[in-house]
Amino acid sequence: MSLPTMKPLTYAGLITAILLIAVSLYAVEDIPAFGDENSAVNKYIKLFNVNADGLVEDLNAGVLPAEIKNKIEKMGFIKGPTCEGCQDENYPTLEEGNYEIKWIEKGSLEGGRMSEGGWDVLIKEGEIYYNEFQQYYFIKESDGNLTVYRYNWPVRVMEKTEEETFMINAVTSGLADYRGYDTMGEETVILTGAIGVILLLRRRGRL
Amino acid sequence: MTPVRKTYKRNVIIEVTTNLMFPLILLFGLYVMIGTGGTGGGFQGGTILASAYILYITVFGHEKGREKMPESVNALFKSLGLFLYNGAGWICVLFSLATAQWLNMPAFWPVTDFVGVAGARSFLVGYMVSVGIGLTVMAAFVSQYFDLAWKEDDEMEGGEE
């Protein structure tokens, strides 16, 4: 049995298809798993840097230094209004006894997240949502500086949409960018529905 | 036996109103479809565009409506919308070679050279993605309405092939 002869154009199409498949495989390789808590997008948000002089001992003793606490509260992560007549923010307060500081070894899985080595600031609140200590802030030491991160909560899209997608409308960036694959499927469903109606109802000679 | 075609009684008020409103509804549909910076969106804009054609077909019949929206244009719009949407995402995959989001592109050459990253993203989201969605939705709805109108017409002719 001999293979059917192929035209040169068919070879070109085959090579193009193979190249495109290779490129898409290469791109897919880099995609973090959906909902992976350790991917850069989902992990945490960087807040600020402070000088580490004398603060490491405080952290090891389980006390949040006043400098870091003041800076966090200055950024608006407080309970109550941030300005006159503003809406109340609902971030947990950093009062004594309300939090706990814990050193996390590098590579340990704490709360489902792979740690990079640093201090976790765990927060306990008297609400039903915080009935045990929750990972809230993360402090990492590098080059004599302490970098303070906040663990990612579902508000990330609201906070970062302008910076990450350059859109002024968070709903549009959610529809077309963050959930773009979802919208692609919806559009495909509509097209498939129209094709199904054509196949079922349309007769010959109606085009 | 000659098939008895159902003749509709003409209503001048409805026909004149439809003729007047048809371009205005199309314009409003375009405004909603492209205005993604505000309250608009592709799905809603496409539905409004389709509603203009559906109104026209309802009033004037599918034979006159087919002149407004030929089947070739309809089929072209249906697939072109999906190609536009998927092409926008595919371009971003190719240019960034890694994508966790749909339009994740650090540098979208050559548009970014002229208008910057923000303008390029606004163009992609506001025009390519939204217009793609809108075209597909409009063409799909109009096509389904044509199919139903033709089916009703065939049944009135007594199942004639």
Image: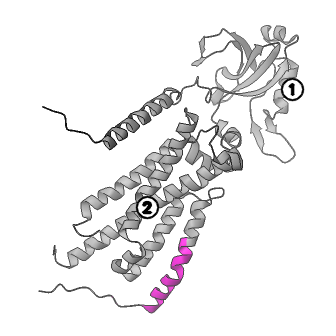
Task: Look at label 1 and name its amino acid.
Answer: Asn
Category of crowding for the residue at label 1, using alpha-carbon neighbours closer than 10 angstroms: few (below 14), some (14–19), many (at least 20)? few
Side (left or right) of A111 relative to A53: left
Q: Tell me the subunit letter for badge 1.
A: A
Q: Position of residue A86 (x, y in %)?
A: 81, 46
Estimate the x, y position of residue A58 in percent, counting from the top left: 83, 10
Return the residue at label 2: B77
Q: Residue at x 22, y 38 (%)?
A: A5
The residue lying toward the viewer, choosing from A40 and A115, is A40
Q: Which residues are magenta?
A: B8-26
Q: Quadrant of the N terminus of chain A?
A: top left
From the top left corner, tell me how far across and down residue B45 is, in percent.
53, 63
Position above or below: A85 against B157: above
Relative to the observer, which residue lies in front, A197 or A113?
Answer: A197
- Using the rendered image of the protein, determine whether residue A155 is visible from the camera's viewpoint: no
Residue tagged by mark 1?
Answer: A70
Amino acid at pointer 2: Phe
